[in-house]
């Protein structure tokens, strides 16, 4: 199953200049595979304090476990999605 994850936070809880939060986030992402979560893409908009991830997992339970250590670092919206059309190789 594919999921799009949106994480938001405000200025007071921003990770950009907090080394401890950055290391905690990076460690969680690096451990995704060990928990059954594959990261396909990750994007962020620092000015809006928003990050997006596209992940794949067999279960929501695996995602819950993968994010357990960083739940308090913001608000997480996890939305299951499906690919409706094959990806185009050339536009």
Image (spheres, helix red, strand yellow):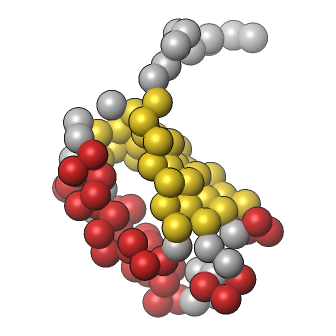
Q: Quadrant of residue 38?
A: top left
The residue closer to the viewer here, 87 or 77, is: 77
Residue 76, above or below 22: above
Q: Quadrant of residue 8?
A: bottom right
Quadrant of the snapshot with the N terminus: top left
Query: Disc count in the image?
Result: 0
Residue 2, above or below 70: above
Residue 60, above or below 83: below
Q: Quadrant of residue 2?
A: top left
Residue 15 appears left or right of 39:
right
Answer yes or no: is residue 50 visible: yes
Residue at x 46% of width, y 30% of height: 81
Residue at x 45% of width, y 23% of height: 82
Q: Could you say where residue 27 lies in the image, as x and y percent from the top left?
A: 36, 72
Residue at x 38% of width, y 62% of height: 29
Residue 19, above or below 83: below
Q: Could you say where residue 88 lies in the image, as x and y percent from the top left?
A: 62, 11
Answer yes or no: is residue 33 visible: no
Residue at x 43% of width, y 78% of height: 72
Q: Could you say where residue 16 lies in the image, as x and y percent from the top left?
A: 64, 80
Q: Could you say where residue 13 lies in the image, as x and y percent from the top left?
A: 60, 85
Residue 20 appears left or right of 69:
right
Residue with the most extreme right position: 47
The residue closer to the viewer here, 87 or 2, is: 2
Quadrant of the snapshot with the C terminus: top right
């Amino acid at each position: 199953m594919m999921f799009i994850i949106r994480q938001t936070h405000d200025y007071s809880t921003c990770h950009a200049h907090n080394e401890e939060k950055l290391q905690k986030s990076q460690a969680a992402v690096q451990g995704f595979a060990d928990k059954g979560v594959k990261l396909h893409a990750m994007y962020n908009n620092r000015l809006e304090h928003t990050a997006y991830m596209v992940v794949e997992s067999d279960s929501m339970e695996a995602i819950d476990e993968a994010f357990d250590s960083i739940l308090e670092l913001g608000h997480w919206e996890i939305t299951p999605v499906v690919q409706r059309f094959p990806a185009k190789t050339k536009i």
